[in-house]
Amino acid sequence: MPVKIALDCMGGDHGIAVTVPAAVDFLRTHPDSEIILVGDEIAINKNLSSFPSDQADRISVVHASEVVGMDEGPAQALRGKKSSSMRIAINQVHEGRAAACISAGNTGALMAIARFVLKTLPEIERPAIASFLPTASGRVCMLDLGANIDCSPEQLYQFAVMGKCLVTASGGSKNPSVGLLNVGEEEIKGNETVKAAAELLKQSNINYHGYVEGTDIYKGTTDVIVCDGFVGNVALKTSEGLAQMLGHYLKEEFHKNIFSKLIGIASSPVINRFRRRVDHRRYNGASLLGLKGVVVKSHGSADQYAMQFALERAYDEVKNNILQNISLNVELTQKGMA
Amino acid sequence: MPVKIALDCMGGDHGIAVTVPAAVDFLRTHPDSEIILVGDEIAINKNLSSFPSDQADRISVVHASEVVGMDEGPAQALRGKKSSSMRIAINQVHEGRAAACISAGNTGALMAIARFVLKTLPEIERPAIASFLPTASGRVCMLDLGANIDCSPEQLYQFAVMGKCLVTASGGSKNPSVGLLNVGEEEIKGNETVKAAAELLKQSNINYHGYVEGTDIYKGTTDVIVCDGFVGNVALKTSEGLAQMLGHYLKEEFHKNIFSKLIGIASSPVINRFRRRVDHRRYNGASLLGLKGVVVKSHGSADQYAMQFALERAYDEVKNNILQNISLNVELTQKGMA
């Protein structure tokens, strides 16, 4: 069975200039995949015509006359943009023409439309946003990154199940360890919600590690880190800000004078290796988990290289039946409860 | 009036080996200061004897027979360690013999004992932990960093007032801008607590900037960033973890082979300049704000250089009457409300 992915070609900062070449490239490396390009048909076909037609039979184009703006509110996008490339890409999944969809458009609108069109899995209260981050020893899957501001213990527990399934579907451990983000590792720490979620996790058959702290995210203490969307969003954006500042400082120091510029040139192989290692593009692709369909959000600024990773994420989720696994695992772990 | 500081000499990873030399150094550069060294009298005097006696008339030693352990619970330290160096250092402030106290001991115990002995300012519901962090353009004061897990809008508002006073007392702007940490900048974002706190801040005469996101911390968008202790703690520790990981990666790349090692040696002036710029020791000293006395927490791993900054923080707070300013500002901003 080919893996069929619908790609919103209009979203993000670069639109067709990035999405179409990324799709062509992805088809080359994934012979069992098919891509539906959704957006301005004329512009897409024009861009497509610059590529050799080897993959032509695995590409189709579906026209969309509107685009959801990056600053558009979720409600507005949901009600007012029924012909948007984002909406029509999600429709492809709903109507069974694709198993997954990807958009680099605005996250709030994507989640709102995906929830409305696809609906939430019956076992899941609310979908969550999950992403992988680099760690000292590999990578960690963190969720929720901003979809749910206030979470119940049950929701945090469901996030743990979904994170576990994402790790397994993405080539990671079959029994990933799960940490619950808190302000300390001791049992007495944290608020009532976190404490109650810890009890649910202890009683389940999830490989529950216990509480973890902010420092544990990048240490790679666990395979999955669960938190509410407020905390997860702040942690993610704080990291982005710090990495930007440090990169900026490093650049400034290497550009300070002739001497440091020369050192900078000599150091470039080392610095470039370092850059590749922490390249956030390799972690592009946040999964909207808990929906009746695979939906992946690409970063708005994603280039062709980054977009490949978002496509890969969607491909892996479909290939490894993440939806069935989430449903099955919620049931299994619930049965495993005392 | 000399600024009198009580220093818990036993707390932290290094105890007397760091605290006593740091105190002697600080007295040299601050001729209007006096320091009370609290801890094992014999050990302190032995360490003191290795220094010239120029500052001897501005140093006194108060004996303490116990030490609060780094892993000791706050309740246990509060009830069981009445003769600890931490408790006796705080007592110096309570009994008017010192205007400030500093400890590198465990944060939970320090806050619990300080609240019990000194009490909270009448205008403040709960004390908070505040610290400065480096930004692209200078520094930002962030609070609460972990003292209060669940916060009311009124508490967040009081944190804003206290952060404002700390910035001013530490040589910053007289009218610092205050941002409220949220998951987006739009008015509709965030939970009910954050929204209600925003209303209080808008109606006060605080220089309120609006919502800020995690990325804004290190951008330096505002002088003060206010959040609850759960979010603040996670943001701070996530930053620590990321910085450690990046430092580790950079070191690894420079140690990969002979070639990169040589480049590493050549680059060391640039890398060292970068390191100095982001040296967390320069930001050592978290203020426990809202108490009837100045209390500063030094990082447990602080060396002599780092300890100087914690002493400086306490000195500035006393010198610039932070306690009176907090009380006055809470009243003023409350009067300024519509």
Image: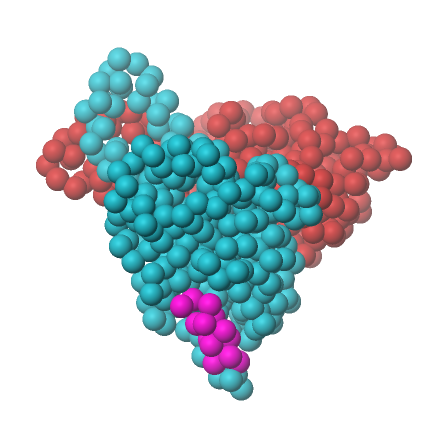
Chain colours: A cyan, B red
The location of residue B44, given as percent across then percent down, is 44, 47
Residue B331 pos. (x, y %): 83, 37
Q: Tell me where residue A39 appears, x and y as whole percent.
A: 50, 41
Q: Is residue A163 visible?
A: yes
User: Can you name the residue that lies furthest to the top here?
Assistant: A258
Identify the residue at horizontal 64%, vertical 43% (top origin).
Answer: A81
Q: Quadrant of the C terminus of chain B?
A: top right
Out of A331 and B4, give the one closest to the viewer. Answer: A331
User: Which residue is at 46% across, 75% downward?
Assistant: A329
Query: Magenta part of the protein: which range?
Result: A321-334
Furthest residue toward left: B258
The residue drawn where x is 57% and y is 61% is: A118
- Residue at 26 percent across and 18 percent down: it is A261
In the image, taking residue B188 as reference, residue A293 lies left or right, namely left
Left or right placement of residue B37 versus residue A196 in this view: left
Q: Is residue A327 magenta?
A: yes
Residue A158, placed above or below residue B280: below
Q: Is residue A304 visible?
A: no
Q: Is residue B142 magenta?
A: no
**Residue A177 is drawn in which quadrant?**
bottom left
